[in-house]
Image: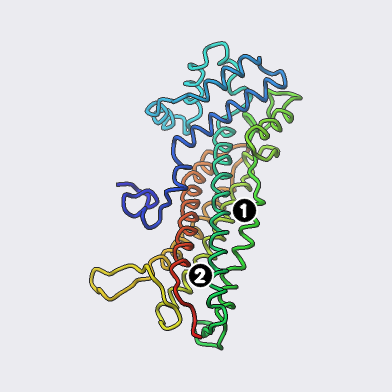
Amino acid sequence: MTASPFDHPFLSGLVGDDEIAPYFSAEADIRAMLSFEAALARAEAVHGLIPGDAATKIAEACAGFSPDLTSLRAATAKDGVVVPELVKQLREAVGEEAGKSLHLGATSQDVVDTSLMIRLKAVVFLFAGRLSAIFATFDGLDRQFGRNRLMGHTRMQAAIPITVSDRLNAWRAPLATYRDRLTEQSFPVQFGGAAGTLDKLGPQAAAVRALLAQELGLTDIRQWQSARLPIADIAGLFTSISGSLGKMGQDVALLAEMGGEIEMSGGGTSSAMAHKQNPVAAEVLVSLARFNATALSGIHQSLIHEQERSGAAWTLEWLLLPEMTMATAASLRLAKELTGNIRRLGTA
């Protein structure tokens, strides 16, 4: 039994996502953190801040390192963040001499935030592909049923007849915008050191940061450890995606309620009424849209990052953003399933 429906033994079948969930596993997080440490060592060696052989040893150790998770858990309960214990264990693995060069000029937030950006970049690539697949399904429905008629509704009342194309365009247009925004989304490295000044790296700081970003495939920008727009921006985009898919789900549920203008397969069964075909996917799209809309207010609360670093606002992001990402993943999965199950729209 788990506290989250997104990885619950059976609720995850409804709102989970087996493709996206691994990006929020401890293993994926640690792997990305180790990528940061290896890339940082290489960048600092290039600019003469640490010996080249030390960077090689650090990179080799990071490639095959498996930390003691029990110790990481205990230390996180005390330190509030996993990085101090992870770096301690990694220093033991690389040896005393090379260990002096490990994590030079960095702080815990650099490692944690950059790990998140590495993983979100991969997730967003998958989301863009899912949006393209949904878009293609809409195109197929439009070719097949676009000229059919639907009754248009305004303020929950019958208005004037429209075509299926009209309704599909209302569902499809926002998704094209989101697909473009996903492909254009930047994922910045976070590298600021103890207080955002990279004080230990001196005049080489900007050059090291730029090379670190290049090594990790991220965007090079000035540190953002207390200015959380990158987090708020991606959370807002996820909320918009799930919101527009929720609008589609609500429309489909209403069409199913009225009957006559839609035929679908794959509906859910009822334990009490064998004749029912419940529009489960459509309903859950509405729920997920409302979930993300609610959680986004918490992400906006986390913009209040006091002074140079906030433990409270930072922790709030950890509670909210992974579940918002999972809700968006489930929305995209269910939307593809729902649209694929439409057998007829409108009347000829």
Q: Is residue 2 left or right of residue 26?
A: left
Q: Front-most of 89 and 261?
A: 261
Q: Whole-percent x and y of residue 182? A: 62, 53
Residue 174 sits in quarter: bottom right
Amino acid at the residue labelled 1:
Leu
* Mark seen at residue 248: 2
State the residue at coordinates (61%, 15%): 54
Say if 120 sits above or below 11 in the image: above
Say if 70 sits above or below 9 in the image: above
Q: Whole-percent x and y of residue 298? A: 51, 53
State the residue at coordinates (49%, 36%): 29
Q: Circle 1: is it few (<14), some (14-19), or many (20+) Cα within 10 Å?
A: many
Helix or strand or loop: what does disc 1 sit on?
Answer: helix
Q: Circle 2: is it few (<14), some (14-19), or many (20+) Cα within 10 Å?
A: many
Q: Front-most of 56 and 30?
A: 56
* Mark seen at residue 182: 1
* Cα separation between marks 2 and 1: 20 Å
Helix or strand or loop: what does disc 2 sit on?
Answer: helix
Say if 76 sits above or below 245 in the image: above
Q: What residue occupies the far left of the structure in this picture?
A: 272
Q: Front-most of 339 and 236?
A: 339
